[in-house]
Amino acid sequence: MKRRALVSGLLVLIGCGGGEGPPVSVREVAVSAASTTVLVGASTQLTARVTGVDGQVVHGAQVTWSSVTPSVIGVSVTGLATGLAAGQGKVRASYGGRAGDVEITVANPPVASVTFDKDSTVLLLPSGSATLAPIAKDASGRVIPNPTFFFASDAPKVATVSPIGVVTAVAAGTAIVSASTEGLTATMRVRVTANVTPSSPRITSVTPLVAGGSAVVSGENFASSVGGNAVLVEGVAATVTAASTTQLTVTLPATGWACDVVRPVALQVNANNQTGIATASLRTAAQRTLAVGQSLVLSTAADARCNELSVSGGAYLVTAYNTARTISGNEASFALRGAAVAAAQSVALTARAPRAVSPAGTPPSLTSYPRIGSPQFARWQDDARRRHADGTHADILQRSLDFARRQGAPSAAARRLRSLTDEGVTMVRARANQIATVGAVTQLKIPNLDASSFCSQFLSIGARTAWVGKHAVIVEDTVSVINGVPTLRGQMDSLYAQIGQEFDDVDWPILTQYFGNPSVFDASLSPAYAGIVVMVFSPRINTMAGGTLSGFVASCDFYPASQAPSSNNGKFFYAVMPTSLAAGVGAGSRGSWLREIRGTIIHEVKHITSFAWRLSQNTAFEELWLEEGTARHAEEQLARSLEGTTWKGNADYRSSLYCEIRPEDATCGGRPILMLRHFDNLYQYLQAPDIYTMFGRTGIADATFYGTSWSIVRWMIDHYATSESSFLLPLVQSTKSGVANLEARVSGHVWEEMYGEWALALYADDYPGVTFANGRLKFPSWNTRDVFAGLCADLGPCTNPASTRNLYPVAYPFTPRRVPFGAFSTTVSALAAGSFSSWLISGSQAAPQLLDLRGAAGGDPPGQVRLAIVRIQ
């Protein structure tokens, strides 16, 4: 009995392992980890799961643990894995002839500090080198093994550094070498010099070095020939123009060094296979001295890069502008840096503030009108709606331009006329007689703006002729009810007669004088509409495009129906109708309609004129921004005829916009809305010129480009044209487009120059107390400061600080960044073409002010960025 018990005990010990091999066959050993990523010095617990051939888990199996990568990770007999060095580690569990692995990533702990083992090092020419030893530590001060560093040299022409940290001497001078990891950087100063022997070139004196200038180097042991000497300034080669054994004359390149204040640099002379080194002073910035009222437009990339304002104090407006000529792909990222100057401080400007009222006296406040948002206020001033309408209008015009560009020239007139049978000629004459007969109804089409292609999809209407003039026929949709609401058909004839007569007597002469004959393409259109513009008024248009438009034209009408099914094959203008017979000005009233439609007509027929001229020449269409800007000029000419203002007359608020916002003032004679749109767009642009562009929309509701494109054309006409028509006519009838078209109108001046002057003029125009030496820093036709101040007085807080009307919250919207003389840095991440950024630099000036234009990440700035500067105090 005792022997049997002993045998049984031995069998139990063997079955449990007892440190010996397993009693069963093993199919798999699977290993898992509490975490598959650990930091150096940290641990994670591993677990092994043994499965027998019968698919059952072998409980109590004691596996053997080992590290496959012992330099990266270690493991204890209990399966506790500890990170030893950064890398990919592998741990193995073995049992019964089977093994399983688990991979564990070992990472360094976050870097808390980075230093070099020394602050500086000296290298000798030629090609001396050293291996840098940056040290990274974690938060506990423990050195992190094998971190990944990224090395860089700020002066690679002096010393280069390899990806593994080997720094090599290139030329005499000083370089700052950096090592970066995880967003932290350490720097080391590297000085490159050379061993000097009695026969080495010896430099005894150097005249001041100026980038782009000449200098004289005196000494001994130079080569007697020009070609026998090489002169380098901080590694940048100068050109030797004259040589003797005791004197060298050199010319420095204009660029190659970082923009900085005057500083000591290493001058190196290589001659007779030896090197001589001395210290000289280098000026990299162009010195600029401006009196109050003087300005500079640095219109080349080289001139704009590095400049220095002399010690004068006061205040300077500095504008950086993107001269690229199209938006797409031309954003510029850059920084403007001012050098640090000891004891510099910001002080308030002492120049007088801009006038808050018109020189003709303070305009009466509109205190009798309710606050913004009330129905009464909205009936005469709804800026947000107009801005949205401008954006919608731009979209429609762009779609028209895109259609015409895809189609090319329409069918030739001769081809169309040859296809007409005698019966066709009779039908054309009948339609011409019909549409010219008051009361006759003609079947016409309205392009459906809500369709995907309004040149293909349309609404058919019966159009009653309501008025016939010399240059226009006005027709009205005969529909009697829209959306269950009766229309005003048959009740508008007196107003149609008013706008039709104004078109014949005022608009048509303006159009033909300044833009060209709208009928120039009539030979290729239906003879039924020859010589006339057909104006179609329909309540159906009120509901199109979100109900935001007053009127529109479409390029489709210049094409036969075979190319554009929506075409009426003539010069057509489509517009909304009022919806209320209520007297005065209010939502949908005839008075509000009349105020809007008069400017809309001349604006849209100007587009017709542009289409006609470009098609008649079979040339490319104008770019959208300039097409809209010049259409605003048509509105401006109509405003002149109604207001009595003149070209270069410096029109103020009282003589122009004052009456546009007073629709019920009897003394204003019911002026239409004309110039308010121009200055509203320009006001919005000047509040943030960095984010808007004259070349188009930056957002769906952005209409600022209408005002800016009008403004720059106005500025160019005022300064370069002998007459307004001599500028505008060839601009519209040109075969060029966009900036190239504008440049072609002005001989001897380029966009890079004109854009800079225009940007300065936006601030300098009628600036109080300063006479500007450059006469182009103004808008002779408009006193822009007075116009904006008047808007702020009437529709903002300038007259009454407690006013709830804040459409125009300040007297002048152009507010550049204010920075002190001395140290400052501003990074502009994405400046679009046709945009600018500005700074007002002021305060106490203890030393010359450096203006360093550079790339956003350092180095040279984008090639399309320029600077314009004017001293205003």
Image: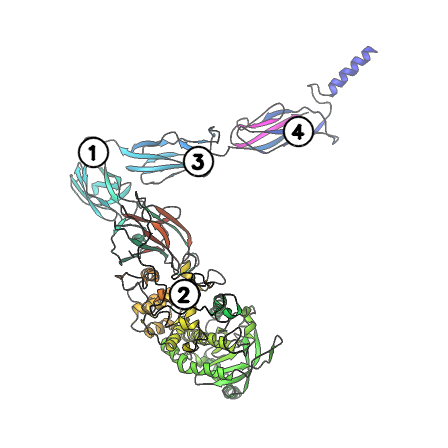
Q: Nearer the viewer, residue 444 or 677?
A: 677
- As for residue 774 lying within the magenta part, the answer is no
On the rendered image, what quadrant is the C terminus found in? Answer: bottom left
- SS state under label 4: strand
- SS state under label 2: helix
Which numbered disc flags the more N-terminal residue, 3 or 4?
4
Residue 238's label in the rendered image is none
Where is mark 1, residue-wise?
200
Which numbered disc flags the more N-terminal residue, 1 or 2?
1
What amino acid is at disc 3?
A: Phe
At label 4, counting other C-alpha atoms closer than 10 Å, the crowd grade (few under 14, some 14-19, many 20 or more) is: many
Where is mark 4, residue-wise?
48
What amino acid is at disc 4?
A: Ala
Q: Position of residue 447 (x, y in %)?
A: 54, 74
Which residues fall within the magenta stretch? 69-97
Q: Does 450 sit left or right of 511 as displayed?
A: right
Which numbered disc flags the more N-terminal residue, 3 or 2?
3
